[in-house]
Image: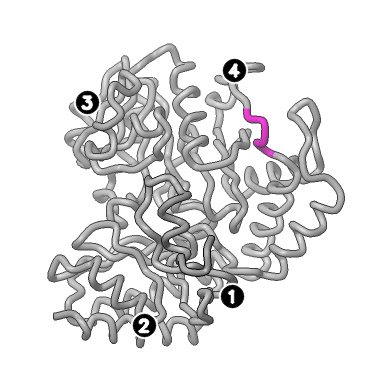
Amino acid sequence: MSAESTWQDHYGSRIMKSAPTPLARLVRGEGCYVWDDNGKPYLDFLAGIAVNSLGHAHPVFVDAISRQAATLAHVSNYFATPPQLDLAERLLRVSGGDRVYFCNSGAEAIEAAIKLSRRTGRRRILSLKDSFHGRTMGSLSLTGKAVLREPFEPLLPGMEHIDTSIEALEAAMGDDVAAVVVEPIRGEAGVLDLPEGFLRAARDLTHEHGALLILDEIQTGAGRTGTWFAFQQHDIVPDAITVAKGIGGGVPIGGLITFGAASDLLTVGQHGSTFGGNPLVTATANAVLAEIERAGLVENARLRGDQLRRELIALPGVTEVRGAGLLIGLGLEHPSATALSRAAFERGLIINAPNESSIRLAPPLIIGDAEVAEFLDLFTSALEALP
């Protein structure tokens, strides 16, 4: 890169054009803050889109990576390692599941879920309109956003996207349905809650028709919604959940957790991943989850989420507060979310506008009174700056 060029020029000429030019070049982070290359700090209320559960450079996270890298970073799936087995044990304990398959991302976890569904011998899979499950060809087939799917069609057959209502689900169900795949809260759609009773109805209908109920907990898992997983707030047990993002606290890891008979559907050689379950990421994820448990961060997510909701719903221009725990969606009176997120960024606050009428908040689970107070000051200032 020449002295005259900027990092934006370098990015634009070197990185694939699948994302817009980044807002800044970040160089370090600590706790709930990140700094750009000009030394400006930002309060991070997005946490890498619900990834950095412990914030940035948490000592537990750093120590786990350092210790494991000094012993064993990667082996093939011909071998087991203690971190892999330890993480499996912890995930199954906090979820109530029976088996786990490890991979490297949320999209890969969804791919595993699709293959699990196909092992029923059926082909129809139902998901929701406006849902988001990933960008690989399989996960994109499930995603209920036509604007994302259409450039890559034809996609996997048998995927059907239905309205988010119990009535639509009842009408679509049949004995040829392999699975119903839903997000307990649709994060990429603006943190949209499901209708009251939807998950209970989905569980009953899938039982009735012999189909699987698979919940995409990639964004809602790891304590973010005030319980370890969002399904635990609905008095149901799914057949499988997909996990990623916050369980690793910043390292790339995903997984498929199965319950009951679904745990026996995939057999030797039917799925795999070179890097899935490697000791470096499993040791780190196990340390992250252990710290979430030790520090009471699941309960903190619930309490801080309630605290933020009480304050946010009182702000002018905010018409609705959605979600659970520290996955929060704000409905705006006027469609100005992009301008609002930009104004917030200029003031040193990172938030997200998944669409023009919604703001998404997903801060680290470690936030306390000081971070909540600073967020409210910065966010209110950004709101007041809008025309």
Q: Residue 146 occupies which quadrant of the picture?
A: top left
Position in image of residue 131 (x %, y %): 30, 42
Q: Nearer the viewer, mark 3 or mark 1?
A: 1
Three-letter amino acid code at the position of disc 4: Gln
Residue marked by disc 4: 270
Q: Which mark is residue 172?
A: 3
Q: Which span is picked out in magenta?
A: 273-277
Q: At numbered mark 1, what does the secondary structure look like: helix, strand or loop?
A: loop
Q: Residue 311 occupies which quadrant of the picture?
A: bottom left
Q: Mark 2 to mark 1: distance in Å? A: 18 Å
| Mark 1 vs 4, N-terminal side | 1
* Label 1 neighbour load within 10 Å: few <14, some 14-19, many 20+: some
| Mark 3 vs 1, N-terminal side | 1
* Label 2 neighbour load within 10 Å: few <14, some 14-19, many 20+: some
Q: Compared to 233, does 176 lie above or below?
A: above
Q: Nearer the viewer, mark 4 or mark 2?
A: 2
Please report the residue visible at 47 percent of the width from the left and 49 percent of the height from the top: 14
Q: Mark 1 to mark 4: distance in Å? A: 41 Å
Q: Nearer the viewer, mark 1 or mark 4?
A: 1
**In the image, residue 9 lies in the stretch drawn in magenta:** no
Residue marked by disc 2: 347
| Mark 4 vs 2, N-terminal side | 4
Three-letter amino acid code at the position of disc 1: Gly
